[in-house]
Image (cartoon, helix red, strand yellow):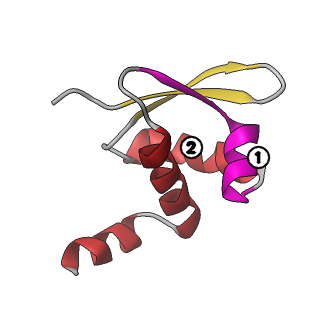
Amino acid sequence: MLLQSKFLTKYNERQICLINYLKNQMKPGSNFFKSKYIAKDTGLSSKEVGTNMALLSEICPEFKIERYSYSNSTTWLVTVPQV
């Protein structure tokens, strides 16, 4: 229960939604995600996805998230950091 409480206070609802989405969609190696497709799958707007992915890139140790390119929508490169 304590871990869940920490999770909820560290991240907002949209960020939790994105983290869960990434956990379910990740495959071994590098993964590329477009904001517009994440938005379509999660019910968030593309702007919400972009804003929160940028925040997660700085505060979420579970993933290494980088803005990769922009072509019709921001593409994000997501990897799992090696320990």
Q: Is residue 36 magenta?
A: yes
Quadrant location of the N terminus in the rendered image: bottom left
Percent position of residue 73, x then y: 78, 30
Q: Is residue 14 magenta?
A: no
Disc 1 and disc 2 in contact, CB within 8 angstroms: no
Density class for disc 1 (Cα within 10 Å; few <14, some 14-19, many ≥20) is: some
Q: Position of residue 39 (x, y in %)?
A: 72, 49
Mark on residue 53? 2
Residue 42 position in % (x across, y down) = 66, 56
* Disc 1 element: helix
Q: Residue type at mark 1?
A: Ser
Q: Residue at x 75, y 49 (%)?
A: 40
Relative placement, left or right, of 1 versus 11 is left
Question: What's the magenta region?
Answer: 30-44
Q: In which quarter of the image is the C terminus?
A: top left
Q: Distance between the residues labelled 1 and 2?
A: 10 Å
Residue at image point 66% right, 26% down: 75
Q: Residue placed at 51% from the left, 67% from the top?
A: 12
Q: Is mark 2 on a helix, strand or loop?
A: helix
On residue 46, the disc is 1
Check the image and name the residue furthest to the right: 72
Query: Is 45 on the left or on the right of 61, as rendered?
Result: right
